[in-house]
Amino acid sequence: MKSRFFILSLVLIILPLVAVGQPAAEDLVSGCVLSAGENTTYLKDFRIQLPKMAPNGAAPVYKANMYLMKNMKYRFSVCNAPESNGELKVTIYDQGKELISSFNSSSGKKFDTVDFICNKTGLYTIWYEFIDGEQGSGVGVVCMIK
Amino acid sequence: MKGTITKIAVVILLLVASSCRNSGTRQGGLNFPVADSVPSGEAEKLSDEALADIVQNIASPVEIAAILQSMQVPFSAGYLAPTNEADRLTTNFQKAVMLGIYGADLGYLNMYEKTGNSIDVLSTIKRLADGLRVGQYFDFETLKRLSLSKSNLDSLLFLSVNSYNHIDNFLRENNRGSISALMIAGVWVEGQYLATQVAMGHNDEILRDRIGEQKIILGDLLMLLRPYRTSSQEYQSLYDMMESISSKYADVRVSYRLGEPETLEEDGRLVMVQHEESIVEMSDGQLAAIAEMSKEVRNKLISGL
């Protein structure tokens, strides 16, 4: 009887999480691709879910490595999930050197998209994190600009 | 009674866990494990982090096509891999490589808005994806509808590239990295074939640079395939073929010129112009040798090795 209850509880808990979670993520990606604007072609999306920064810890970061090509223009867009506490930001690094970020911590200015006009083919590291290390979820979309 | 409830619960859990929505269409079906050519325990495993380092955007099905289009190179159906023999592909190895090759062809067709011609490629991709038990990530009906209507090219491009991203993610997350690596290799080989074939007839600096820069990417692609090469003759042959392309790049030089980036704001967007530059030095002879070897490898792959 106990195991019957356990299994049914598991089903009821997991079912809505899986059934609702995937469409929501897909919708968020589609919306974020649209927000990248016209004259763009979707290349990649990253689904980000990060916990709140631990006290005295570093802000959690989602890192992805991506080849970017010379003579191409890329648009990096970030979109927050409706239930997200934090605001997603994207930063592009080239061999450990920060190139551009959608959030300027000095001025507090935020951008939903950043364009990167690439002149050097190579492997770049894309960092996604939530401002001030807040808990959050969202998506990052990379498009090429036609 | 207890057993029945347990079974029902397990079936529901499996159905839910294996379901996947792709832009409005839910295609059911359980995902049974597939006996891929490489048992997970046999391959020298790459760490997740190392794999992530290698595979993101290593070969995009649309970027080469975008360059060709910007060069105003006319579309040529002659570059496409034939689809008439796809049904005779029997191994997962062949299916995965061809899934990548047809993916690049689909990108080429879509970028040139030859969407009416793409139905045949779409059907073939669907069959191969089903054969690899990843068909649930390929929303054939919607793609077909968008292709026939020619009404929304952006949606078509998004959905087709997104399907490939989903398949790639699913394979890597489900311990089928060997199949993902083959698919990526297929996309790369076909993109390389398209680029080099066009470059032989059109002297374009951007395209030449793109081909030359593949020296960097090919090195990582070889690293991606290396752990699987001893697992079967098919993998070993593919690895050897990729190495033969790599050998043609031996004297191609890629250097870098330093420069400080420039940041500006345009229409409320932050824009960064990179002034550091990669420079490719590649002779006509080197390009011809790379093109010839790329063609040979691609033709071997589409003929089933």
Image: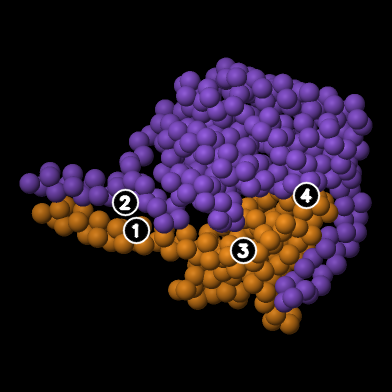
Chain colours: A orange, B purple
Front residue of this view, candidates B204 and A12: B204
Q: Which residue is mark 1?
A: A19
Q: Earlier in the sequence, mark 2 or mark 4?
A: 2
Query: How busy is the neighbourhood of tag 4: few (under 14 within 10 Å), some, or many (20 plus)?
Result: few
User: Looking at the image, which residue is at 33% across and 46% down?
Assistant: B28
Front residue of this view, candidates B37 and B132: B132
Give residue B16's mark: 2
Q: Chain of mark 3?
A: A
Give the alpha-carbon distance from disc 4 to disc 3, as whole Å: 31 Å
Query: How busy is the neighbourhood of tag 2: few (under 14 within 10 Å), some, or many (20 plus)?
Result: many
Give the alpha-carbon distance from disc 1 to disc 2, as whole Å: 7 Å
Asked if the residues shown at circle 1 and circle 2 are in contact, with their CB atoms under 8 angstroms apart, the answer is: yes
Q: Which residue is mark 4?
A: B70
Task: State the SS at label 4.
Answer: helix
Q: Which residue is mark 3?
A: A128
Query: How busy is the neighbourhood of tag 3: few (under 14 within 10 Å), some, or many (20 plus)?
Result: many
Q: Quadrant of residue B238?
A: top right
Q: Is residue A113 above or below residue A67?
A: below
Front residue of this view, candidates B36 and A56: B36
Badges 1 and 3, same chain: yes
Give the alpha-carbon distance from disc 2 to disc 3, as whole Å: 29 Å
